[in-house]
Amino acid sequence: MPDLLTHEEYQAIGNSLDFPTNAFINGQFQASKSGNTFETINPATGQVIAKIAACNADDVDHAVMKARESFDQGHWSKLHPSERKEALIKLSKLIKRNIQELAVMESIDSGKPIRDCATIDLPETIDCLLWHAEAVDKIYDQTAPAGEDALAVIVREPIGVVGCVLPWNFPLLMLAWKIAPALAAGNSVIVKPAEQTSMTALRIGELAIEAGIPAGVLNILPGMGPEVGEPMGRHHGIDAVSFTGSTEVGRLFLEFSAQSNLKKIILECGGKNPAVVLSDADNLDSVAEHCVAAALWNMGQNCTANSRLIVHKDIKDTLLEKVREKMADWHTGDPMDPDNQLGAIISQEQYDKILGYIQSAKDEGAELIEGGNAIEVGDGLFIEPTLFAGVTSKMTIAKEEIFGPVFAMMVV
């Protein structure tokens, strides 16, 4: 785990960054076919960071063609497993060499606290790549039972061209979760990063070439969901799509598959997760610490966030006070300041959605215990860590995924 730098040092790195803005196809950066761009905004300041190439179906076609060419040529797909391993290990080393630059870029683009980017997301991104790299030549195949006159062998082969559609809450980590196994298996890959957080994925594409991964094997297409994600889902030249995001859009990818080539679809969708604390729970200080961290980490923008705290009536008052004490340790502010555990909300749309859930909880009779307000810091998008009590199973915040720093105590 890298040591944290100072606020000033992170700001200096941010001021020196050269932000990637073009699509990365066939080993090089290039503008979108249409020439269109979109703005990526720093949610902590409201300022435009850069204008990113807005790809569309034409760019998807081009990327699929290059990915298929690279796959068929076999420079990666038929490479000896140990050589693929070496390239992925080299990529992980290059990420480690550029860890501070990537952490700052991710923090600026997403509003995530730099302490999380530098000490959690980047190290786990590196570890994920290394794990799959080492697995390349250590996954053994099997033989099926057969008579003496036959040999039945089970062989794993790369599926071909894999599409990866990323969320904005863990841009680099979700990139690694998807590309590491796909590349390790010998596939060619096309990545659509979330439009809110495209830049670190583009930088990884560049580092992949430096690591020796052949041109066309890893392609990065920034753009909007309907213009890039849907054409990927419908494309007959893509053999599988891995998607992380909302349940609503996950259902659409199943439809796209059914309406095209029945490509394999791997989904990681939303959640509404409980932390259950019963009357025999020991060490409520530790319980409270874990409950708060599980609810607030990454500003609650996490599909595994424990946004429901289900507590036995005999300990509810004691636990409530301990939760309030632990919440006081979670400071919200400038994501580039390593003293802050909470940064900015990703976008105006998500900011308004979270405040809407807070208001609905008030309107439906929940008791506001902590927080509940927007934090006015220039044009930044910040919301106080928020806790409600007296929540029933019929209330909106007990049923719907909030994806913000808001959690609800429900007594049983």
Image (spheres, rainbow, N blue to C red):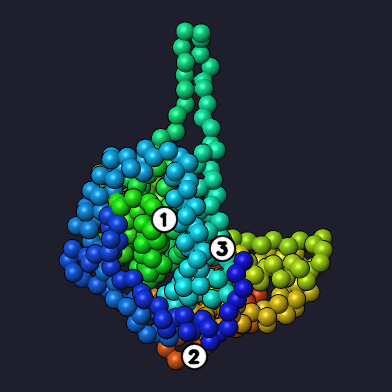
Q: Is residue 132 above or below residue 358?
A: above
Q: Residues within 10 Å of mark 2 (few under 14, many from 20)?
A: few
| Labels 3, 2: front one | 3
Q: Which residue is mark 3?
A: 123
Q: Is residue 361 left or right of residue 248?
A: right
Say which mark, if any, is on residue 376: 2
| Labels 3, 1: front one | 1
Q: Residues within 10 Å of mark 1 (few under 14, many from 20)?
A: some
At x 60%, y 76%, the residue is 4
**Secondary element type, mark 3:** helix
At x 48%, y 63%, the residue is 95
> Which mark sits nearer the N-terminus, 3 or 1?
3
Residue closer to the observer: 290 or 2: 2
Q: Is residue 147 above or below residue 80?
A: above
Amino acid type, residue under disc 3 in the picture: Pro
Disc 2 and disc 1 in contact, CB within 8 angstroms: no
- C-alpha gap between disc 2 and disc 1: 44 Å
The answer to which image quadrant residue 109 occupies is bottom left
At x 38%, y 51%, the residue is 213
Q: Which residue is mark 1?
A: 211
Residue furthest left as drawn: 34
Say which mark, if any, is on residue 370: none
Give the x, y percent position of residue 395: 55, 69
- C-alpha gap between disc 3 and disc 2: 32 Å
Can the viewer see residue 213 in this picture? yes
Give the x, y percent position of residue 382: 50, 83
Amino acid type, residue under disc 1 in the picture: Ala
At x 42%, y 88%, the residue is 379
Disc 3 and disc 1 in contact, CB within 8 angstroms: no
Amino acid type, residue under disc 2 in the picture: Glu
- C-alpha gap between disc 3 and disc 1: 18 Å
> Which mark sits nearer the N-terminus, 3 or 2?
3
